[in-house]
Amino acid sequence: MGYLYEVPGLNAWAIMLFVILTLIAFNEFGRTTKWGGILLFLIVPIILTIFVWPKTAAPNNEYGTGTWFNWVKTYSALAGCLGFMAIRFIPALAKRKWVLVFPAAILAINILEACFRDFQVYSFGLWEGGYVDNLWVMSGSWNIMNGIAGLLNIVTICGWTGIVISKDKSKDMIWPDMIWVWIIAYDLWNFAYTYNCISDHSFYAGVALLLSCTIPAFFIKKGAWLQHRASTLALWIMFVMTVPQFADQIAPVPTTHNPQAFFIVSLIALIANLALFVYQGLRIVRLKKHPLKDEIYKDTKTYQNVLAENV
């Protein structure tokens, strides 16, 4: 870890594990009970918006939580959670194919927001590093590389027409065509984004947060990655907006501020998403699929297993 981060102590590892397990637990609470989801993603945010965030996430505060990006990301994540709940629990909505555009659209918008932020950090011209909105960043070619990786990740979003609602009690929003190859490419891109744009917060906002949604997608409720991602992202941002000093004072794990590390992390993300783009393009051509209408991975075992478990 000494290459990417200043070597964290045992306390930091314990806190990271606690963060991951807590996010997974709250995600399960919101996923398996309708009232839990309403409490976490509607009632609590309203209370925090009125009584807490105007103070803890005020513009130009010392922790960097008062930026436009934090506020936009908070409410877009919450909009995703509430929108997904509407699709899950209002049967008429899931039957209308045009409604299923929403999950793909909110995902694409969230990725695009981060791409814009990467390009913006490059425009700052902080080639030796510096503080913007009280967050340390370093501009470089990595911002451009990772911005392109994110755009490729958007282009490869596919199969939204095949979204279904699981038949079990939790009524999860299942996206069978969002298989592991896309999820891994997303994780690599998103980690690079956090490393580039919120560097000294990325140990938690990158590594821990991504694990908290990827683990459930692979081992708890397969096919529901986007639902897991929206919920854990919303929970994390709400926490950060409420306790902004967490990553800077309570449990800091700074990056090494090594330009080579920035470059390598973004290069890996770019290569992974370029490979996904080429692989998916070849499948589209070979199987004669329409990239906006058809499910690209319907013939794969991963897709078929997810569908069999939920329908």
Image: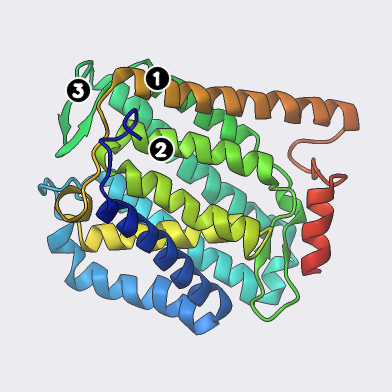
Instruction: Point out residue 273 in the picture as x, y percentages from the top left corner.
Output: 59, 28
- Amino acid, disc 3: Gly
Instruction: Point out residue 284 in the picture as x, y percentages from the top left corner.
Output: 81, 31
Tell me the quarter of the picture where residue 44 sits.
bottom left
Residue visible at 80% across and 25% down in the picture: 282
Q: Is residue 86 left or right of residue 285?
A: left
Q: Is residue 183 left or right of residue 138?
A: right
Instruction: Point out residue 23 in the picture as x, y percentages from the top left corner.
Output: 42, 64
Q: How is the image coloured?
A: rainbow
Tell me the quarter of the picture where residue 5 sits.
top left
Residue visible at 71% across and 73% down in the picture: 92
Residue lying farthest to the bottom in this orientation: 35
Q: Number of callouts in the render?
A: 3
Contact between labelled residues 2 and 3, with CB atoms less than 8 Å apart = no
Give the secondary structure at mark 2.
Answer: helix
Give the secondary structure at mark 1.
Answer: helix
Alpha carbons under labels 1 and 2: distance apart: 17 Å
Name the mark on residue 194.
none
In the foreground, 80 or 300: 300
Name the mark on residue 114.
2
Work out whether 210 lies above or below 195: below
- Amino acid, disc 2: Ala
Which image quarter is the N terminus in?
Answer: top left
Residue visible at 67% across and 30% down in the picture: 276
Precedes in sequence: disc 1 or disc 3: 3
Label 3 environment density (alpha carbons within 10 Å; few <14, some 14–19, many ≥20): some
Tell me the quarter of the picture where residue 157 sits.
top right
Label 1 environment density (alpha carbons within 10 Å; few <14, some 14–19, many ≥20): some
Precedes in sequence: disc 3 or disc 2: 2
Q: Which residue is mark 1?
A: 263
Alpha carbons under labels 3 and 2: distance apart: 19 Å
Q: Which residue is mark 3?
A: 129
